[in-house]
Amino acid sequence: MRDRVDMAQEGRPATVPGAGRTARALWYVAAGECALNAVSLPEPGPEDCVVRTLWSGISRGTERLVFEGRVPPSEFERMRAPFQEGDFPFPVKYGYCAVGIVEAGPARLLGRIVFCLHPHQDRFVAPADRLVPVPAEVPARRAVLAANMETALNAHWDAGSGPADRIVVVGGGVLGLLVAWLAARLPGAEVTLVDLDPARAAIAAWLGLGFALPGEAPREADIVFHASASAPGLATAIAAAGQEGCIVEMSWYGEGAVAAPLGGAFHARRLQLVSSQVGAIAPSRRPRWDYARRSAAAMALLAEPLLDALITEEIAFDEAPARLPLLLAPGARGLTAAICYEAAP
């Protein structure tokens, strides 16, 4: 399948009516169960776009919690994704990594490849100002990483990362890898990825990072990012921080309490435990940045071809209900899974 489509060459009409049309969307219908259901498309307004989806990405950490029905009732509203339908725990249409081509809408966007924080659906209607144009140098398939990249960028703003810092990232999922990759681009930075899986050493090397198992994690780090969503990982992150160092907690655990080793030398070393979450722009940038500027910056960072290695599975949209239970199972290997909506020509 081609990443970019010239609508004139394809012979598709410049306008596609939305009223009365239906699409298919992925719904989480019960714990461990999902299905493709028909949904009605709304009538597009003058500033709305009709988007035909090419790819969408599975956010393993968050979508696993949704898939298992582990979103806490206290977070039902805060966890709502843009364009979500249904309510937690089930049934719910969820997801936020869609990339497609604009088939109808304002002339400035017609035929453009765009990213949208939209659930997994083969065609959708969204306001033009909710779409992020994908630059020509970023393939549509790689653009599904945009939401994770935006989270990683925001985390560095929260941390105040700088040149020559000693930076440790605990947790080698896609988010941890993007955080570490951004850190490695800082001049003189010493960056180490820490993960339980020795196989992560290969992708760390591919991205220009150091690697260590938890028992060998560096100490005296200036900044530690924690992205493993586990209590042992958090303990490793705290142990890695140097005097008055900063631990940036990026994991979201869902329901239940998480043990944090705040005894021992935690207070004597005057460590900082900082929360980072993409829903709000980091205070250091908030006076000057809005969400659109941050989204565009994250998308531009995806121009690096090395990042294709973070997409480790590809599944057809029709096969998603059958494939997702294995992809989202506890302990499942792999990083980002990309859903493909069109067969290769």
Image (spheres, rainbow, N blue to C red):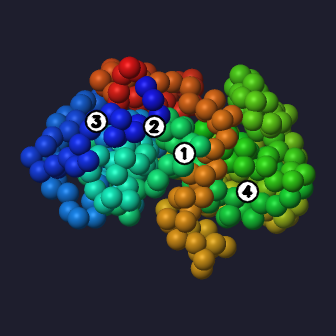
- Of labels 2 and 1, earlier in sequence is 2
Q: Residue 85: x percent and y percent?
A: 24, 50
Q: Mark 4 to mark 3: distance in Å?
A: 53 Å
Q: Mark 3 to mark 2: distance in Å?
A: 14 Å
- Of labels 3 and 2, earlier in sequence is 2
What is the three-letter code of the residue carrying label 3? Gly
User: Dot 3, how many residues are within 10 Å of its Cα: few (below 14), some (14-19), or many (20+)?
Assistant: few
- Of labels 4 and 2, earlier in sequence is 2
User: Which secondary structure lies at badge 2?
Assistant: loop
Could you say which disc has been placed on residue 11 in the image? 3
- Residue placed under numbered mark 1 in the picture: 136
Q: Residue 315: x percent and y percent?
A: 42, 23
Is label 2 in contact with label 1 (beta carbons under 8 Å)?
yes
Q: Mark 4 to mark 1: distance in Å?
A: 36 Å
- Residue placed under numbered mark 4 in the picture: 247
* As drawn, 80 above or below 141: below
Q: Residue 207: x percent and y percent?
A: 75, 35
Task: Pick whichever, 163 or 62, lies toward us.
Answer: 163
Q: Mark 4 to mark 2: distance in Å?
A: 40 Å
Locate the N terminus and report the quarter of the image it occupies: top left
What is the three-letter code of the residue carrying label 4? Ile
What is the three-letter code of the residue carrying label 2? Arg
* As drawn, 38 above or below 183: above
Task: Please report the residue visible at 59 percent of the width from the left and 43 percent of the height from the top.
Answer: 137
Q: Nearer the viewer, mark 4 or mark 3?
A: 3
What is the three-letter code of the residue carrying label 1? Ala
